[in-house]
Image (cartoon, grey):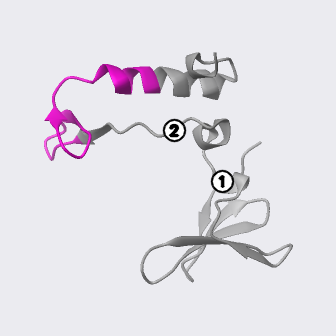
């Protein structure tokens, strides 16, 4: 069972299992475990998404909404109005991971 993240006034974000995420002045995240008094730059499993825990690399495409609610897709270089096949396949893999079943990238 996953714990919900909770943000505090001191800038920390509780991510579960005793871990909190903080940010350096330059924006780099680091993690501190209050139970073990351990601090690390390596993201602990408690702070990882299901995709990160499963080892699924991030997709270079992202969905972006315009001010009027229209959706387009960008990879940081190109922008297109139709969802790229790469992003559609990535979303299917994420759904498989969330359901706990095997996914294509594991085969």
- The location of residue 103, given as percent across then percent down, is 61, 18
Q: Residue at x 65, y 53 (%)?
A: 4
The answer to whether 92 is drawn above or below residue 55 in the figure is above
- Quickly name the residue at label 2: 57
Q: Which residues are magenta?
A: 65-90
- The location of residue 68, given as percent across then percent down, is 13, 41
Q: Residue at x 36, y 27 (%)?
A: 87
Q: Pick the quarter of the image with the N terminus.
A: top right
- The location of residue 51, given as percent across then percent down, is 58, 37
The reply to whether the magenta stretch includes residue 56 is no
| Number of numbered tags placed on the structure image | 2
Lateral position of residue 80 relative to residue 104, left or right: left
| Circle 1 residues within 10 Å: few <14, some 14–19, many ≥20 | few
Classify mark 2: helix, strand or loop.
loop
| Circle 2 residues within 10 Å: few <14, some 14–19, many ≥20 | few
- Quickly name the residue at label 1: 4
**Most foreground residue, 6 or 61:** 61
Q: Pick the quarter of the image with the C terminus.
A: top right
Classify mark 1: helix, strand or loop.
loop
Q: Residue at x 63, y 50 (%)?
A: 48
- The location of residue 94, given as percent across then percent down, is 54, 28
Labels 1 and 2: the sequence-earlier one: 1
Q: Quadrant of residue 91?
A: top left
Residue lying farthest front?
Answer: 107
Distance Cα–Cα, label 1 vs label 2: 23 Å
């Amino acid at each position: 069972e996953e714990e919900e993240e909770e943000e505090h006034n001191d800038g920390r974000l509780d991510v579960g299992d005793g871990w909190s995420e903080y940010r350096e002045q330059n924006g780099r995240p680091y993690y501190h475990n209050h139970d073990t008094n351990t601090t690390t730059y390596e993201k602990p499993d408690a702070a990882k998404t299901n995709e990160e825990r499963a080892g699924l690399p991030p997709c270079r495409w992202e969905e972006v909404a315009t001010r009027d609610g229209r959706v387009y897709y960008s990879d940081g270089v190109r922008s297109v109005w139709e969802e790229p096949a790469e992003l559609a396949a990535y979303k299917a893999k994420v759904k498989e991971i969330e359901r706990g079943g095997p996914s294509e990238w594991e085969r």
